[in-house]
Structure formats: C-alpha cells, structure tokens
Amino acid sequence: MSFMSDAIQAYHTLFDDATAREQHRLIEEGQRREGLLFGTRPIVSVLRPHFITQAHASLLREACQSVALAARQVIEHAMHEPVLLNRLAFTPGEQALMQIEPGYAEWSVSSRLDSFLDSENGSLQFIEYNAESPAAIAYGDVTTEIFLELPVMRAFAERYRVHAMPARPRMHQALLDAYQAWGGAGQPRVAIVDWKGLPTHSEFVLFQRYFAGHGLECVICAPEDLRYHNGVLEAEGRPIDLIYKRVLTSEFLERLGDDAIEHPMVQAYRDHKVCIANNFRAKMLHKKSIFALLSDSSVTAAAGINADHQGVLDRHIPWTRFVEPGHSIYDGREIDLIPFILAERDRLVLKPNDEYGGTGISIGWETSAEDWEQAVRAACKEPFVVQERVHIAYEDYPAWRNDRLQIARLLVDTDPFLFGTEVQGCLTRLSSVTLLNVTAGGGSATPTMVIE
C-alpha cells in the first residue's frame, strides 16, 4: 500500500456511524457560523480533506509556474502575430478594455489552474487557466480552519503531520503589491466589485472581514453602485483606491453594451484614478484557447520556449486546438481537424472559448454520435476549442448521507491558486460526475492539506 493510500485508510478507520454523524454536525455548524455558503448551500458535504504530499505540492508549484510563465510568453508573442491574436477571439469590447494601460506590469494578480492530480501515480494534467476572477480562496482557508478543529482531525494528527495551505494572506499581499506598483501609497480603500445577488457573495463577506482585520477599509458593491466625479471614484459615498475585481469582463460587457467603456469604473481606470486587480488584460490569459497555443509546439517554439520548458508543457497540458476547418497535428501526424473531431469523440471534449460553470461543454464519451455531430457543427460557428481527454483522478471520501456513514469514490479536481506565477493554496472540488463544477450546483469542495 502506498503512503497516500495508507494515510487515507488511517483517516477512514477513525469513523463509524456515530463519529460520522458528529463530524458532519460540526462541519455544518462551522460553515453556517462562518457563512461558508454557496447561496444557501454549504460548500463542503464530505468528511475528509484532500490530502497531498510535499512531493505533490512541489510538483504543483513547479508545473504551475512553468505553465503560467509560458502562457505569458506565448501571449507576448501572439501580440505581434495578428493571426494568432485573432484566433484568441477577443471581442471589440474586450480589445478596447485591454488597450487601457493598467498602471502595473502583472496582468493576472491572482489566478487558478484547474487540474487533475492523481495521488497514486503522480499524473498532473491541467485543463483550464482561470486567470481573470478565480473564486474560493477565502472558502478554502476557512474550511481548513473548521476541519483542523475536528476531533477526528486531531486524532489523525497524532500519526501524521498536517500542514494548511492558506491563500488569503497572499491574496491580501498581492493586492497591496499591485496597488504599490500602480503608484499607490499607504493603505488603500478597497471595493470588491461584482453583481448583486450572486451565490458567491458569502466569499466577498469573508474577504471583507479579513481585510478589515488587517487594517484595510473595504466595501462590497456592484458596478452600478460606483460613481466617478472630480477625479474620484466612489462607492457608498466613500472614495475607492483599489478594486478587487470579481466581475467577469464578458458579463460586464454583455450587461452594459456600448456603455461599458464609459462606465465610472472604466473612466477612473483609464484616468489612473483607481487600481484594478485583476486588470482587464487578464483576459489575454483567461481564454480557453490559451491551451491551444501552449499545446502547439510550433507556436511555443516561435515564442522562444526552450526544449526543457516545452517538455513540461507536453507532460501537463492536453492537446487542444481551435475548432475550425483545416489541418493540424495530432500525435505527430497531420489530421483534417473537423473529420478527426467527428470520428474521435470518445477521446475529446468541446469547450466554448469563454464560459464558466460548465456552460456549453460537450463531453464526447458521454455524448451520442448524433448529438456530438450537432455540437461540432455548432462549435464551428462560435469560438470553441477541442481538447483531448485527460487522466481523471479519483479517491474515496466519507460522508454522512441517509443517516449513515457512506464512503464513495469521487472525481477529484485539484486547482492551485497562483499569485502572479507563484502557487499558494489550492481549491479541491469533488464530484460523482465528469462535468465537475460546484458553481453549477453539483459536488462538494473540501480543503486541501499537505501531510507527512
């Protein structure tokens, strides 16, 4: 038995029905006390954290940094190659916002790489780069605190050393670093900006409390709450120096249309009166088609990525291509892309270039031939990518369901947070189905912890 299997088994032997019922009660109470809710639903519904080893943590740190650095290098190259830039499919509104000088160098202050990490064989494959507005940083820290207080975790810690992976301190510092690089001085007044009524509002409250505890005045507001006059951006009548931008650029443009470019937030940003993180240039890294560039060796070579770095990308990024008629390379051979996609649905996934929450995704091996053909035809008309099936990780997780302890095999999504290009903290999502997304209302999150 491997170290990880032994550790998981040791954790599970601490449970019987009575223990499971009590730990479930404590986890539920802790989440409701801290406001750890997605809408009205608790974030965590299982009784075990996701355990990784120091070796796993090092692998995540090194691979994520390689991918993040390569993504920036490839985009810098694409900015001088109109054909590549056009294939990223930026809208006119996105282009207008990205042209505004943000005032500091780092496009994506905080991001998240979504991946599958197999704790048994060490396989790590990334599937998306959420570089614009990553959620769950505060959720992960607070759920970790709740789990570390559980009696069963204290018993487990008698045999294994357990280390938390807090990310809120790095988020806090990353915002301050962006503000200082932008030219700000002292403690900024912060606004967390997103639409009203979102199920993620509870995380904004967690951040507001955390910032307040570290001396940062912070308001939570929607774009419509912002006012700009006499060179000052205000929310709730108070001046704002720094925006922690959680609103997605695509939704901002979709809701406001042509008025978006003259919105108070954008006016102040253009006039260098407010610092925004992540800024609008994060969109360059966020499109799913970034993986179509990173998995194409002809593009990465032209961007100056060396052979060693290319080897890391080959190991961790699945073959991805823009869905369009024409020829491409797959496994060293030339293919006619659209017929190949139609014929190979058992190994492929279709994804819209700019969506979230699982919207618009078609999983080939779970789709009929007729529905797959329709999905491919539709994908030819809109910006889509096709991605090769990756090795999916599964682990056993205990839960209290139907008045008894149940241990079920669940799909495990391991999603490290990056600050610039450095990893700190990790979201883990669990599901019994392939299309794993807690945002869409399924599955469970659970804290990620390093064990020795």
Image (cartoon, rainbow, N blue to C red):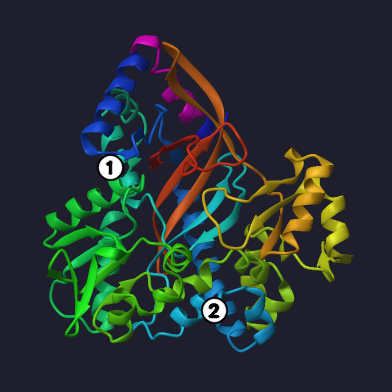
Could one spot residue 69 in this view of the protein? no
Q: Is residue 341 left or right of residue 24?
A: right
Q: Residue at x 61, y 89 (%)?
A: 80
Q: Secondary structure at mark 2?
A: helix
Q: Position of residue 396 (x, y in %)?
A: 53, 27
Read off the residue under disc 2: 92
Residue at 59%, 55% (x, y): give it. Answer: 126
Q: How many marks?
A: 2
**Residue for point 79% across, 50% down:** 374
Among the 4 quarters of the image, the one containing residue 161: top left
- Which image quadrant: the C terminus? top left
Horizontally, residue 240 falls left or right of residue 448, namely left
Going from N to C along the chain, the mark reached first, 1 or 2, is: 2
* Residue type for callout 2: Pro
Residue range (magenta): 6-18
Instruction: Give the class, few, some or many, for how many residues have Cα within 10 Å of label 1's Cα (few <14, many ≥20).
Output: many
Name the amino acid, label 1. Val
Q: Residue 325's x, y, as percent?
A: 82, 68
